[in-house]
Image (cartoon, helix red, strand yellow):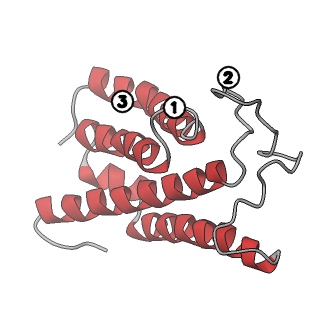
Amino acid sequence: MNMSRIVRSTANILFPFILVFGFYIIVHGHLTPGGGFQGGAVAATGFVLLLVAFSPDIIRDKFSFNSMKYTEALGLLLFIITAFVAIALGTTFFFNWLANGGIIFGESVAFGANPGILNSAGTIPLMNVAVGIEVIGAMGLIIMYMLSGIEGGNKE
């Protein structure tokens, strides 16, 4: 069942803004309350909004089970690769190999409270992005399975 044209139009307008806000929370997770899980959960609410506004068939056409599985796997792979790069560089597992290196995400911060310098956390933003991608995929997959349960069967 479709909702009214006003609800569908509003959902189409709000969906990109919800994704951008979720990405903002992911990227600023090392400076403010938030991070990969919280931002991924916010971004996944955009999928719930589309589910409420449109029919299940339209949602299934836009987002498949496989796309959500691959998104979840991509986030996990990025997280593991970021952790193992430290071992390849000759340090310990999960070592913050980008911190204070002078390149992206490695600018030194003055002593005291961080004034909000985005590129000051080394590998932490990369891991937040990886976790955010994984959470978006996992929650999207949960939503897809709930959708198939509502319809009375698994339509993978």
Going by the numbered disc 3, the residue's amino acid type is Ala
N-terminal of the pair, mark 2 or mark 1, is: 1
Label number found at residue 11: 3
Camera sees residue 91:
yes
Q: Residues within 10 Å of mark 3 (few under 14, many from 20)?
A: many
In percent of width and height, residue 128 lies at: 56, 51
The three-letter amino acid code for the residue at tag 2 is Pro
Instruction: Tell me the crowding category of disc 2: few under 14, some 14 to 19, or many 20 or more residues within 10 angstroms, Cα based.
Output: few
Q: Is residue 72 left or right of residue 148?
A: right
Which element is circle 3 on?
helix
Where is 122 relative to 155, above or below? above
The answer to whether residue 11 is left or right of residue 149 is: right
The image quadrant of residue 117 is top right
Residue at x 58% of width, y 33% of height: 31
Question: Pointer 3 and pointer 1: residues touching (CB < 8 Å)?
Answer: no
- The amino acid type, in three-letter code, at marker 1 is Thr
Task: Specify the farthest residue to the right.
Answer: 102
Work out whether mark 3 precedes mark 1 in sequence or the reverse, and give the earlier one: 3
State the residue position of label 1: 32
Mark 2–mark 1 distance (CA, rounded to whole Å): 11 Å
Foreground pick, 89 / 43:
89
